[in-house]
Amino acid sequence: GSSRARELAVRGAGLRTAPPGANMRDTMHVAGQQRNHVLWLATRSLRAICQCTPAGAAGATEDATAEPRKIRRVLIHFAMEAEGMPLLAELDTLRKDEAGLPNLPALCYSGTYRGLDVVVVMNGQHPIYGVTSVGTTAAAVTAYAAVRRFEPDLLLNAGTAGGFKHRGGAIGDVYVSTSVVMHDRRIPIPGFEEYEKGRLATFVPDGLLKVQSGWKEGIVTTSNSLDYTPEDEIRMRDSGASVKEMEAAAIADVAHQCGVAFMALKVITDIVDGDRPTQDEFTENLGTAAASLQKAVPMALGFIAASHG
Ligand code: SAH
């Protein structure tokens, strides 16, 4: 009957997503020779194979991207050059990686900082439309290609974002993600309730918020739009999000499937539930936010080098 069909659909949704994740992690493990991660990966692969925490179930949010581990190489992913270039002026020993990423307009820079291998990647200019490739498509393909090429232990998505007055957010606030979620993916088919939200826990370095007492933690919500619809607004409120932007949940999904820890560090350029048009506030505050990221990212890297390096 229909309940059997529903059960199969629900299970099917889990089956489609869990095993490829496990396979990818095994491949990454062998290719990367990340021997110190054997136990961590084995536990996770076993869990995925046993489907104790099937993808799409509530358990998925407790997995993976939040796992503390040894961190030697950090991939810092910005969507926009306007966000990332000031950091490159600060970390001036990083050099442009001319090979870049195959078939993508992404820009890559690499070097070391505080004993960590550091790679900075920015999505670059879209080859057809000639503007910065913001949003989830460019973010996901760039993250995937960069993870495969550089095999980082941590993927740090840094950038600008909207904040929420009703959650105490203000322009210039620095947020560390606790989890990510999507607010514009709607798939009203049984079994897709959790997938559409794509909620994933993220890595919060233990004690970071004690050292950086002015920083905040919060849920980051992602969509492909700078503005939002009434339905988006309901979903953003229900999810408990403090930060709205256009890439984090997509990049976290890639990180999760590749077995790489993920965190987002976002500076607020505009107030989503304020009275000024987002695009005006965003443009006005982009420069200051990038300057703030120029200082905030090295602080986060320094903390991670000391605590997990
Ligand atoms: N017209 C802009 C386009 C930037 S789109 C330009 O080319 O300068 C906005 C970018 O900033 C995205 O990468 C997104 O992640 C982030 N962002 C900042 N504030 C946002 C908000 N309120 N909603 C969605 N994304 C936001």
Image (spheres, rainbow, N blue to C red):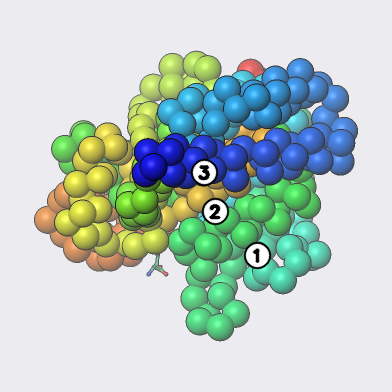
Q: Residue at x 46, y 31 (%)?
A: 57
Q: Residue at x 64, y 29 (%)?
A: 48
Q: Residue at x 65, y 24 (%)?
A: 50
Q: Earlier in the sequence, mark 1 or mark 3?
A: 3
Q: Earlier in the sequence, mark 2 or mark 3?
A: 3
- Structural crowding at the residue carrying mark 1, measured as other residues with C-alpha within 10 Å and reported as few (<14), some (14–19) or many (≥20): many
Identify which amino acid the numbered label 2 is placed on: Phe
Instruction: Give residue 76's position: percent from left, percent from top.
Output: 61, 46
In this view, the mark in front (1 or 3): 3
Image disc number at residue 13: 3
Front position in the image: 181 or 20:
20
Q: Is residue 2 visible?
A: yes
- Mark 1 element type: loop
Q: Quadrant of ligand 1?
A: bottom left
Instruction: Give residue 112's position: percent from left, percent from top.
Output: 75, 40
Instruction: Determine contact: label 2, label 3, CB under 8 Å.
Output: no
Q: Residue at x 53, y 62 (%)?
A: 137
- Structural crowding at the residue carrying mark 3, measured as other residues with C-alpha within 10 Å and reported as few (<14), some (14–19) or many (≥20): some
Image disc number at residue 78: 2
- The residue indicated by pointer 1 is 106
- Mark 3 element type: helix
Instruction: Give residue 301's position: percent from left, percent from top.
Output: 61, 33
Q: Is mark 3 within 8 Å of ligand 1?
A: no
Name above or below for residue 175 compared with residue 208: below
- Mark 2 element type: strand
User: For this view, does 218 lie left or right of residue 12?
Assistant: left
User: For this view, does 186 lie left or right of residue 168?
Assistant: right
Name above or below for residue 162 compared with residue 153: below
Q: Is mark 1 within 8 Å of ligand 1?
A: no
Name above or below for residue 177 compared with residue 284: above
Q: Earlier in the sequence, mark 2 or mark 1?
A: 2
